[in-house]
Amino acid sequence: MVTSDRHKWLALALLSVVQFMVVLDIAIVNVALPSIQVDLGFSQQNLQWVISAYALVFGGFLLLGGRAADLLGRRRIFLAGLIVFTLASLFAGLAWSEASLITARALQGLGAAVITPAALSILSTTFVEGRERNIALGVWGAVGGFGAAAGVLLGGILTDALSWAWIFFVNVPVGVTAFILAPILLKESRDATVKSFDALGAVLVTGGLSSLVYAITQAGQDGWLAGRTVSFFAASLAMLVGFLVWEQRHPEPLMRLGILRIKTVSGANVAGFIMGTATFSLFLMFRLFALFPKEPPRPRERFSRKMAVLTSLYPPRPRARTRRLVLGRAGLAGS
């Protein structure tokens, strides 16, 4: 437990910066995809895995990372996640082929899946329940949201000014600094009520979520009704249903399902799902603009960067006037 008030807020600043880095890395890659494709010779089919490998591992191991933090020590797991994420970022920037970059992105996702729940647990134990904790969680969540928006802009700037490798290298000094400061600002803690590890639950939920993300990713390539896609959806459904049944019987479940009966928790999850879906759909739109076939890579990245700024300065307006306004401000009216 962090005792000093000053240390509390410094700890919040550290955790917020790390969360910004983790969320930033989800979005920052989108704008650099054309340059990555050209430099590493990615096929159009495999290019999606630069993003999907991160999402697949991150989504699949999130619950497992949270329980490991409670059982083994929150700061210890947080530091382990930082090591994995930072080294994976360095490896991604030095990638020389499709396989090496996709592997590095998967390792980044693993590090992020460990960092995020550990950081959230540290916040919950550092700040007293009530107004103080609400402020801390609000700041932490807001910084994560800003990281998602900033990723589109920074991806274009770094790729244009330096190279696509720097969208990964930029994580290294942040990760090293956070690793040095974490033992100073964060105190070790663990959940004393947890006596055993729900291994079967961890396997079921990790396998189920990973299969679900993989099925959704492959559906765009193979088709939603393709045999391979349907088989992964079926496997995911079977494992997730098995997880729900098992959690109700286990004395120390990986996830207490009763928490979903709390209206604020279930409502927040629904809202988060809708917001996440809308946000990452917007990232896809920027990627489609970046891959516009009539422009060379660097102008395409500048265009995506310009569009990111414009959509933040000029919020959506009704009817066709929106399109004329945005394209006019971008200097593309009449093209």
Image (cartoon, grey):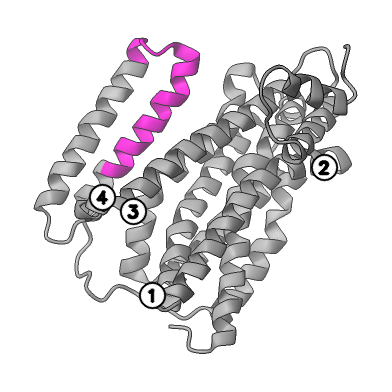
Residue beneath disc 4:
260
Q: What mark, if any, has residue 129 been given in the picture?
A: 1
Up the image or down, 227 lies above or below 2; here it is: above
In reply to whether residue 115 is colored magenta, the answer given is no
Residue on which the image places disc 2: 157
Q: Nearer the viewer, mark 2 or mark 3?
A: 3
Q: Tag 2 or tag 1, which sits nearer the N-term? A: 1
Quadrant location, the C terminus: top right
Q: What is the three-letter code of the residue carrying label 4?
A: Leu
* Mark 4, other Cα within 10 Å: few <14 / some 14–19 / many ≥20: few
Say which quadrant the N terminus sits in: bottom left
Q: Which residues are magenta?
A: 205-228
Q: Amino acid at mark 2?
A: Ile
Instruction: Provide residue 213's location: percent of width, then percent of height.
Output: 41, 32
Q: Which is in the foreground here, disc 1 or disc 2?
A: 1
What kind of element bears circle 3?
helix
Q: Residue at x 84, y 17 (%)?
A: 295
Q: Residue at x 68, y 31 (%)?
A: 316
Q: CA distance from mark 2 to mark 3?
A: 39 Å
What's the distance in space between the residues labelled 4 and 3, CA to CA?
Answer: 9 Å
Against 330, residue 198 (above or below) is below
